[in-house]
Image (cartoon, rainbow, N blue to C red):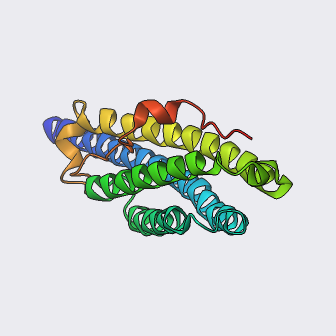
Amino acid sequence: MNVSLIIVLVVLGLLVIYSVSIYNRLVALKNRYQNAFAQIEVQLKRRYDLIPNLVETAKGYMAHERETLQAVTEARNTALAGLKHAAAQPGEPGAMAELAGAEGALGAALGRFNMVMEAYPDLKASENMRQLSETLTSTENRVAFARQAFNDAVMQYNTYKQSFPPILLAGPLGHREDAALLEFEDSAEIQAAPKVSF
């Protein structure tokens, strides 16, 4: 066999092995950010499940605040729909923007709910309401941590995909689009723990 042919075959073999390792790393990083989004999904679903209980508990006390309660319920339903869309396509920019917008609206509705709740001392004193609020606060913190882990995983994926030489192979190997971070409109407020006072 010709020595130059052997050298060419060895070089081609090394290139194939290197390409496979780049592909495997891209897949691993993509799976990591998709798993991180699944953790956000778990916490957001928990949050969304708490909100109807919070509204039901408040209904008995806040009979004259139907608009506020309805706004919270509608915002929760919109956020849940946004989560379902985002869960089908974690990292897709449009889905992340839709979820971020819905979460912003839900946060605003919950903020109005908390302000209205201040006018009802009996509601604030309710043990059930206190437990629900504490659970919601805890869940908000978990959402923040899960979102941070997701954004870190997306950043690792995008950084690797955009670096050289993976950038040469990412597109042809099916990794054309960068993953989008999950950034809420009121990012500064989200960094602070929600304040629910009784």
Tag count: 0
Position of residue 135 relative to residue 194, above or below, is below
Residue at 22%, 30% in the rendered image: 164
Q: Position of residue 186 (x, y in %)?
A: 39, 38
Position of 82 with respect to 43 (left or right) is left
Residue at 61%, 57% in the rendered image: 47
Q: Nearer the viewer, residue 174 or 54?
A: 54
Position of 24 with respect to 193 (left or right) is left
Q: Position of residue 116 (x, y in %)?
A: 58, 50
Residue at 65%, 63% in the rendered image: 62
On the question of residue 131 being in view, the answer is yes
On the question of residue 11 being in view, the answer is no
Q: Nearer the viewer, residue 14 or 196?
A: 196
Residue at 25%, 54% in the rendered image: 173
Q: Position of residue 150 (x, y in %)?
A: 48, 43
Within the image, what quadrant is residue 155 found in? top left
